[in-house]
Image: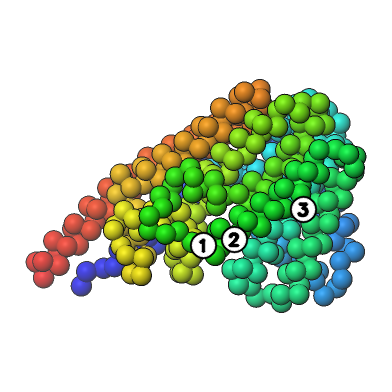
């Protein structure tokens, strides 16, 4: 009997994180800031002691499993395709912009951690969660208050950063609506800049006020425009990467309409919107070098654009980080092409054996 192509997916064909793909390492991007990360960890632990007992276990889940600020072990990413931009983007940009005050750098990083922690319970409320709604809502607000307090320790009431915080809150809500409720219609190119800019808006909203704040603290307000473009381009590429990593879960949870990658595969196969997109078909499509090449080409284009903005800012740390991502994507794309060839050869052998039987 012919085996299901899903069995090949279980061999981690694509696109999964393959630890054998290891481009040039640049771990100093992370290890240089070990003391700053440890400071943030301790600060978060102290803050969380103030939480009501009823939500402490839920908070621990977000701290150790989701945003992983209190995760055990080394903070250095185990693989170049496991980017950890939070809280490091704040550290890198602060160092690039000459902000040498350690406390300033740490508070910037803390703000990124807390705003991401605030977003996680909100996301889970939309996706469905095992936790009680009141616990999720409480933690989302509580984490956001800590984000606000971190920024308040850095900026005066007259700072323009607060306008960006206010705008980002609106963008965050609008971006969530676009991603969670509107879906992707059959006429939309899910890898297009227009679509990805719209649906990654909520990610931009999380990071941008802190990164813009670096420009204000270093007396470089004109850099805000380039930081805006960098954040937009990076998050557009990150949206594709995130959907690549989550393709299996998204297909099982019927989140196909919200995944740019799965929607692209549907378009490639010419499958009607009301027809199922099975995991077997997804794996088969991923084995097509032309299909996977288009996905990685789109992602690379956004990262190259982000790198261009980082270079214009003379942000060498950020540029090194993007370079790591680009090297990793190239290596993984080659690996996927090789696995796709193996998949097709194995499938041809199975079909031949089936015909003979």
Please, is residue 322 above or below residue 193 in the view? Answer: above
Residue at the farthest left position: 356
Q: CA gap, disc 1 to disc 3?
A: 28 Å
For disc 3, the neighbor class at 10 Å (few under 14, some 14 to 19, many from 20) is many
In this rendering, position of residue 206 left or right of residue 15: right
Residue pointed to by mark 1: 182
Residue 114 circle label: 3
* SS at circle 3: helix
Image coords of residue 277 (percent x, y): 35, 66
For disc 1, the neighbor class at 10 Å (few under 14, some 14 to 19, many from 20) is few
In which image quadrant can residue 99 be found? top right
**First in sequence: mark 1 vs mark 2:** 2
Q: CA gap, disc 2 to disc 3?
A: 22 Å
Q: Are marks 1 and 2 in contact (CB under 8 Å)?
A: yes
Q: Are marks 2 and 3 in contact (CB under 8 Å)?
A: no
* SS at circle 1: helix
Image coords of residue 336 (percent x, y): 37, 46
Q: Quadrant of the N terminus?
A: bottom left
Please, is residue 219 above or below residue 200 in the view? Answer: above
In this rendering, position of residue 101 left or right of residue 70: right
- How many marks on residues? 3
Image coords of residue 265 (percent x, y): 36, 55
Q: Residue at x 59, y 68 (%)?
A: 127
Residue pointed to by mark 2: 177
Q: Nearer the viewer, mark 1 or mark 3?
A: 1
């Amino acid at each position: 009997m012919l085996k299901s192509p899903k069995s090949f997916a279980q061999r981690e064909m694509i696109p999964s994180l393959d630890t054998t793909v290891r481009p040039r390492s640049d771990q100093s991007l992370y290890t240089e800031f070990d003391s700053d990360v440890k400071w943030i960890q301790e600060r978060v632990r102290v803050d969380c002691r103030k939480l009501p007992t009823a939500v402490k276990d839920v908070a621990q889940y977000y701290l150790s499993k989701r945003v992983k600020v209190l995760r055990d072990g080394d903070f250095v990413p185990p693989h170049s395709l496991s980017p950890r931009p939070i809280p490091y983007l704040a550290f890198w940009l602060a160092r690039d912009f000459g902000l040498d005050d350690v406390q300033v750098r740490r508070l910037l990083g803390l703000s990124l951690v807390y705003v991401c922690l605030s977003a996680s319970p909100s996301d889970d409320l939309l996706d469905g969660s095992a936790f009680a709604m009141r616990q999720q809502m409480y933690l989302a607000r509580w984490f956001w208050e800590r984000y606000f307090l971190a920024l308040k320790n850095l900026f005066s009431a007259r700072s323009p950063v607060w306008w960006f915080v206010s705008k980002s809150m609106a963008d965050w809500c609008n971006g969530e609506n676009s991603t969670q409720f509107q879906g992707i219609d059959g006429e939309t190119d899910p890898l297009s800049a227009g679509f990805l800019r719209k649906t990654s808006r909520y990610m931009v909203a999380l990071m941008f006020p802190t990164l813009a704040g670096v420009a204000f603290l270093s007396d470089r307000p004109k850099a805000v425009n380039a930081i805006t473009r960098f954040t937009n381009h990076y998050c557009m590429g990150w949206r594709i990467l995130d959907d690549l990593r989550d393709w299996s879960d998204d297909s099982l949870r019927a989140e196909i309409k919200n995944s740019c990658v799965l929607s692209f595969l549907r378009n490639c196969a010419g499958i009607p919107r009301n027809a199922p997109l099975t995991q077997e078909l997804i794996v088969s499509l991923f084995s097509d070098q032309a299909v996977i090449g288009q996905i990685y080409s789109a992602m690379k284009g956004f990262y190259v654009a982000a790198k261009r903005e980082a270079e214009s800012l003379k942000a060498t740390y950020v540029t090194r980080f993007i370079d790591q991502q680009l090297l990793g994507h190239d290596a993984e794309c080659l690996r996927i092409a090789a696995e796709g060839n193996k998949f097709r050869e194995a499938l041809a052998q199975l079909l031949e054996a089936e015909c003979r039987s």
